[in-house]
Amino acid sequence: MKLKALLKNIFEKFKISGTYSGGKQFGSGHIHRTYLINTAELDTPDYILQKINDHVFPDIDLLMNNISLVINHLNSKKSNTQGFIAPQMVQTHTEKNYYKDDSGAYWRILIFIPGLSFDTINDLQIAYEAGKAFGNFIFNLDDLPAHFLKPVIPGFNSLTKRFADFENALKNDVVKRSDSVKPELEFIFDWFEPMMNIQSRESKGDFTIRITHNDTKINNVLFNESGKAISVIDLDTVMPGTVLNDFGDAIRTTAASSAEDEKDLSKISIDLNIFKAFAEGFITKTHKILNPAEVDHLALSSQYITYMQAMRFLTDYLNGDKYYTINYPEHNIVRTRAQIKLAESMKENQEAMHEIVKGIMHQISAF
Ligand code: ADP
Ligand code: GN1
Ligand code: MG
């Protein structure tokens, strides 16, 4: 079936309002195939139709169940969400939140939230708003018991598991790329022990296990025309985690001076003003639920997550690009190098970042 006919056909399996008038590939996510579907009528919404990546998410029921629990919880706390809207899933005519087509592919539909999504930013107000949005997300889920959600990708936040996957990829070297990435391999080995510190503290119980988003890239927040954050999207990886995963991952893309796949390494560094603006927004929303050990590790968490991300891109490069969508053959190693450069810049600025966090906490507790 031609793509247009396929999209229309899938679209009509769901309880949508309006008439299909066209669909096109949309967004810059690395995981699913995402389409924007327009409807002909002016008073009906447009929709996001996604072909779910079932290689990354093999248990579709678990995936969709986690997301539903979070959306329902967020919607039940309208008084608390203060201007943020949760994504809304659309059900099929048979009351399911996904559709399996004849080829075995899984599809889902969300109501399109008209908003702007950015892969990189350099605006302080946007950074502050993004911090508020992700902070608000965690704050509003604080009373949903973490064990209600199941780990949709086991070991997703575990550095030990990521390192084992990396070592495996290196050992197998299926596409014979290891010789060409010696400096990157060295970086991964050198940083492993110091970075394990965060995981060890987590294992000791120093950080609260709560429901976190786990994919807090800046392009997973939508903004309105005046730069106000309106929604946190891409809820696939909501599951038990720590606040450090969400804060660190957000800083990785929000406070980086360039894109995640910038080729010119001289352009990549951490922008401390953006870091401060994001942290202000985030801490304003979360300070009541953060414990001292969490606050103490916020700055370091960005290095930790950026290091883990470098490892993940490198692992995929060694595996022959099986996980992330790539736009050209070297994409994953370009991404790896960019993450390494960013992690190094974060390390150089660690003290300054930590002082910024302390300053914000001090300011907030003075009120
Ligand atoms: P991936 O896991 O592949 O990143 P996402 O769920 O993040 O998939 O969707 C990809 C992109 O589609 C997002 O970055 C955003 O631009 C857009 N998008 C997803 N859901 C919505 C929504 N409900 N409203 C508007 N845009 C959306
Ligand atoms: C993927 O789905 P997307 O593009 O927002 C990935 C994240 C990575 C990110 C790196 C399920 O995010 O974990 O941090 O790419 N999502 C999954 O850009 O693995
Ligand atoms: Mg996404």
Image: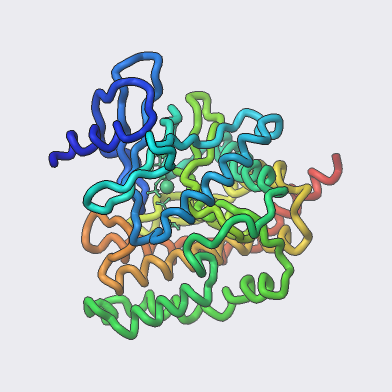
Q: Nearer the viewer, residue 356 or 308?
A: 308
**Quick one: which residue is furthest to the front in this view?**
94
355 relative to 192 in the view: left or right: right
Residue displayed at 39% across by 50% down: 259
Whole-percent x, y for residue 333 in the image: 31, 66
**Quick one: which residue is furthest to the right in this view?**
366
Q: Is residue 180 above or below residue 100?
A: below
Whole-percent x, y for residue 267 in the image: 40, 54
Q: Nearer the viewer, residue 55 or 129?
A: 55
Residue displayed at 23% across by 48% down: 102
167 relative to 361 in the view: left or right: left
Q: Nearer the viewer, residue 48 or 58?
A: 58
**Quick one: which residue is furthest to the top in this view?**
42
Whole-percent x, y for residue 129 in the image: 59, 36
Residue displayed at 22% across by 80% down: 176
Q: Is residue 84 above or below residue 32?
A: above
Please identify the quadrant where the N terminus is shown: top left
Q: Nearer the viewer, residue 277 or 307?
A: 307
Whole-percent x, y for residue 133 in the image: 60, 40
**Quick one: which residue is furthest to the left in this view?**
2
Q: Quadrant of residue 82?
A: top right
Q: Ligand 2 quadrant?
A: bottom left
